[in-house]
């Protein structure tokens, strides 16, 4: 079984509110279908979630009553995005089923407190493709906060031990610096935890409400410690996800699990 996270910046245009990149998603879904592997799909929120979550400061927890509407609006938008992703999966004959995090996960000061992963396991066992997504959730300490797709990746990897975890992003993989602003940025084709720690020392120009590139590196470190491989690849080149699912090597970053 593989777990794939479709990043919000791949499936939406992060600068335009609620802009779904339909064609990009269709191409990725076709590649996933063609590879024909058991998968769980997680997707990010992109411009369906981050803009409004920022506006209402939802990740800081409940501070005023006005935020409640912000929570609902954000949930409504990520649910809409989820419907668009599900449509694409179902139209391409993938039997997908949506599992919204807010109903099976509770955080405690941003950390996992309660998570029911058995529902994922049960759906997988009958042959479904479970689909979950970055969402607003209850938080024991803060009232509510945000659960990113990256956190879901760690939780699902911990509990279901996939063969590999794949992050579909809008760059070829991890770079030595931000390739969007630094033309000397180099693609890191393979990495260990030590190499990732080195990257953490550099300033982060990718930051967003759920952590940016540094957050992503922390996520990968957690998965790697479980002994599971992580691959980051470009979602705008759908043949790459197809080949990786088939076990072939492509332009990407591979972090081999198990390194200290
Ligand atoms: C964020 O999820 C969820 C909300 C803002 C509600 P992610 O952090 O997984 O989304 P992307 O991939 O960065 O867009």
Image (cartoon, rainbow, N blue to C red):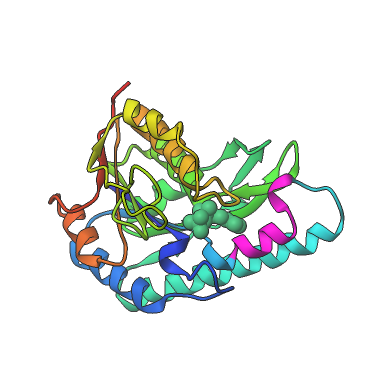
Position in image of residue 254 (x %, y %): 25, 42
Instruction: State the residue at coordinates (40%, 78%).
Output: 22
Q: Number of numbered discs present?
A: 0
Q: Give the farthest residue toward the left.
A: 248
Instruction: State the residue at coordinates (49%, 50%).
Output: 206
Does 235 sit left or right of 202 as displayed? left
Instruction: State the residue at coordinates (43%, 49%).
Output: 120
Image quadrant, ligand 1: bottom right
Position in image of residue 237 (x %, y %): 25, 66
Which one is nearer the viewer's eye here, 185 or 80?
185
Which one is nearer the viewer's eye here, 195 or 243?
195
Position in image of residue 200 (x %, y %): 45, 33
Q: Give the farthest residue toward the right.
A: 65
Determine if the magenta segment contains residue 46.
Answer: no
Instruction: State the residue at coordinates (28%, 26%).
Output: 258
Position in image of residue 231 (x %, y %): 28, 46
- Is any part of residue 133 visible from this angle? no
Vertical arrangement, residue 4 with respect to residue 191, above or below: below
Q: Which residues are magenta?
A: 49-60
Secondary structure mostly seen in magenta is: helix
Determine if the magenta segment contains residue 59.
Answer: yes
């Amino acid at each position: 079984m593989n777990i794939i996270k479709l990043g919000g910046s791949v499936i939406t245009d992060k600068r335009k509110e609620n802009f779904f990149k339909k064609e990009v998603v269709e191409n990725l879904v076709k590649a996933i279908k063609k590879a024909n592997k058991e998968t769980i799909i997680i997707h990010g929120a992109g411009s369906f979630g981050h803009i409004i979550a920022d506006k209402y400061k939802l990740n800081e927890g409940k501070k005023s009553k006005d935020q409640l509407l912000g929570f609902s609006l954000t949930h409504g938008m990520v649910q809409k995005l989820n419907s668009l992703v599900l449509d694409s999966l179902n139209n391409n004959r993938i039997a997908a089923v949506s599992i919204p995090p807010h109903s099976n996960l509770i955080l405690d000061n941003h950390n996992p407190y309660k998570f029911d992963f058995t529902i994922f396991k049960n759906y997988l066992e009958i042959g479904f493709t479970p689909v979950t997504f970055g969402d607003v959730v209850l938080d024991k300490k803060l009232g509510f906060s945000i659960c990113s797709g990256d956190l879901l990746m760690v939780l699902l990897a911990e509990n279901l031990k996939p063969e590999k975890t794949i992050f579909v992003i809008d760059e070829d993989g991890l770079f030595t610096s931000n390739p969007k602003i630094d033309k000397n940025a180099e693609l890191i084709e393979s990495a260990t935890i030590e190499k990732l720690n080195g990257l953490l020392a550099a300033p982060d120009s990718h930051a967003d409400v759920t952590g940016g590139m540094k957050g992503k590196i922390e996520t990968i470190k957690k998965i790697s410690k479980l002994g599971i491989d992580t691959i980051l690849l470009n979602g705008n080149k759908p043949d790459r996800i197809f080949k990786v699912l088939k076990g072939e090597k492509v332009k990407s970053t591979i972090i081999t699990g198990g390194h200290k």
